[in-house]
Image (cartoon, grey):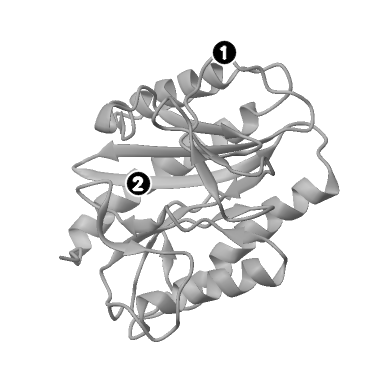
Amino acid sequence: MITLKSSHEIDLMRRAGKITAAARALAGEMVRPGVTTQEIDSAVEHFIRKQGAVPSFLHYNGYPASACVSVNDEIIHGIPGKRVLQEGDIVSVDVGAYIGGFHGDCAATFACGKISPEAQDLIDVTRQSFFEGIQFAKEGHRLFDISAAIQTYVESHGYSIVREYVGHGVGTAMHEAPEIPNYGHPGRGPRLLRGMTLAIEPMVNAGTAAIKQMPDGWTVKTLDGKWAAHYENTILITDGEPEILTAPAI
């Protein structure tokens, strides 16, 4: 069942969203050559706890860290560790924070030093596909209107959409109904209503859409070894334009 949030609950989600967005920004600032993925994770956990929140991901279904840090051909769910970031890498960081009974959830892919034009284009298209999608995140539209817009934009640039993993509702649980594919046919799916809070998250591969699950049980890589990017925000359906609850601070 899709839950509609009250004005009070939305205020609590805004609070969680601001903390989550700030944690993502901190992680992005740390992405540079010589830094380990574990250092990024430690900084994210420290920051979230300092705000009085709890990292949503830590111990979620047994996940061992506070952030997912996925490098190059790792699409999502990379476990932080001793890996040292190198000049030219691209680094996807996914974070969540829980406070006041509600979760925020967001992700982005960051450049490590100077990256290739091809890598930058992958990052840019992935990010823009989110904004193409949420043009349809309005009351009265159908859920798959968002999905179709993301798919159309990504594929028009020659990239592939990951099929096995999708966006989701978010609120008192980190993953709520509905599931939100990044592909599909417009005019299908539940009708969007004000008060819905959704995590929209395109996961885009430079090569084919095929993936492989790594032996750690979490990390998901591209099957062909080409690079991938990820971009996510938690949004609120309103009576007008959607509100991005994890918008970066200006």
- Give the class, few, some or many, for how many residues have Cα within 10 Å of label 1's Cα (few <14, many ≥20): few
The answer to whether marks 1 and 2 mark residues whose Cβ atoms lie closer than 8 Å is no
Q: Classify residue 128 as left or right of residue 198.
A: right
Foreground mark, 1 or 2? 1
- Residue 99, percent across and down? 25, 38
Q: Of label 1 and label 2, which has the lower sequence position?
A: 1
Q: Which residue is mark 2?
A: 104
- Residue 229, percent across and down? 61, 47
Q: Out of 248 and 188, give the one closest to the viewer.
A: 188
Residue 94 versus residue 167 in the image, above or below: above
Amino acid type of the residue tagged 2 in the rendering: Gly
Q: Classify residue 124 as left or right of residue 17.
A: right
- Residue 53, percent across and down? 30, 31
Amino acid type of the residue tagged 1 in the rendering: Lys
- Give the class, few, some or many, for how many residues have Cα within 10 Å of label 2's Cα (few <14, many ≥20): many
Q: Which residue is mark 1?
A: 82
Q: Classify residue 151 as left or right of residue 85.
A: left
